[in-house]
Image (tube, helix red, strand yellow):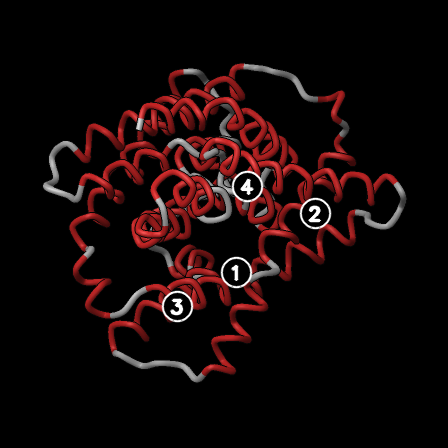
Amino acid sequence: MAALSAAQGILTILIMIITGYILTAKGWFDDKAAALFSRIVVNVSLPALMISNLMSTFTRDKLLHYGLGSLAAFISIFIAYILALAVSYIFKIGNHERGLFAALFAFSNTIFIGIPVNQSLFGDKAIPYVLLYYVANTSLFWTIGIYGIIRDGNRDEKMPLFSPETVKKILSPALMGFITGVLLILIGIKLPRFAMDTFKYIGDLTTPLSMLFTGIVIHNTGIEHIKFDKKIFLIFIGRFIVSPLLAFTALHFFPLNPLMKKVFVIQSSLPVMTQIAIVSRAYNGDHRFAAMMVTLTTALSLLVIPIYMSIM
């Protein structure tokens, strides 16, 4: 039953992608619609989602209490990202693709698939740990992950990490929403219900718009153009083998709750982070390849996740 429940969360994402594909084939959506969805997600719904998720889940005490667990998640994801960059050099991934490759390799779909999978496996008590991993995954993606994707489009120019221009690009609306949520929690400010409801409803647009965007891109790229080259197989290995092993190893050195450790391993074995495709479109990355990887890893997870669930 747990595996079936988890599979339903994965199928939901695939159905939304297929919906975007079919509506594009019918002429409802085009490249202009994809560009509009990208702008809405990056500039409006993602910042709202950050604030809504953080403030509805964490209190100041919880955020500080779970600090050690968050550090373990940070370390495992950071090592996965650095390893992905090393792999991109070893296997001669294109110079303008390395940042996107590393993001696809290291960052997982921690919310939309992570919550139903862990909830079905461990119950509601796992939710705080799911969101704790989400904090680490999100923080690193919207800093080093975004820097790498931006750098892909600027390889021919000098782009130092701490230049004013780079910092301005990295301080995206989504990251600012995340920072705002954390600061409000630490300061102890509670937003009124109408504000929280507004953030929640707008934030809820993120996943459906991202999936419709993915369906549009896949239709316009053409499924027949999918080529199972070394990049795809390396990302499969990174997502479903390397990242869980790194999480398991890193967690071995931390005296954490056994349930937290199990949740973190499951979180690290999930498909590619869905927002990578839409964000790479916003920053002139290879969003077509990213959209393909969102779809392929989500489909493959129907086989992989039950295996990890059995192990856990």
Earlier residue among tags 4 and 2: 4
Picture coordinates of residue 188, whole percent (x, y): 26, 79
Which is in the foreground here, disc 4 or disc 2?
A: 4
* Mark 4 touches mark 2? (CB < 8 Å): no
- Front residue of 244/44: it is 244
* Residue at the spot 32% in from the left edge and 48% down from the top edge: 126
Report the side of 248 relative to 16 (left or right).
Answer: left
Can you identify the residue that label 3 sits on?
56
Earlier residue among tags 3 and 2: 3
Q: Is residue 255 above or below residue 37?
A: above
* Mark 1 touches mark 2? (CB < 8 Å): no
Picture coordinates of residue 178, whole percent (x, y): 39, 63
Q: Residues within 10 Å of mark 4 (few under 14, many from 20)?
A: some
- Front residue of 162/70: it is 70
Can you identify the residue that label 4 sits on?
9
Can you identify the residue that label 1 sits on?
46
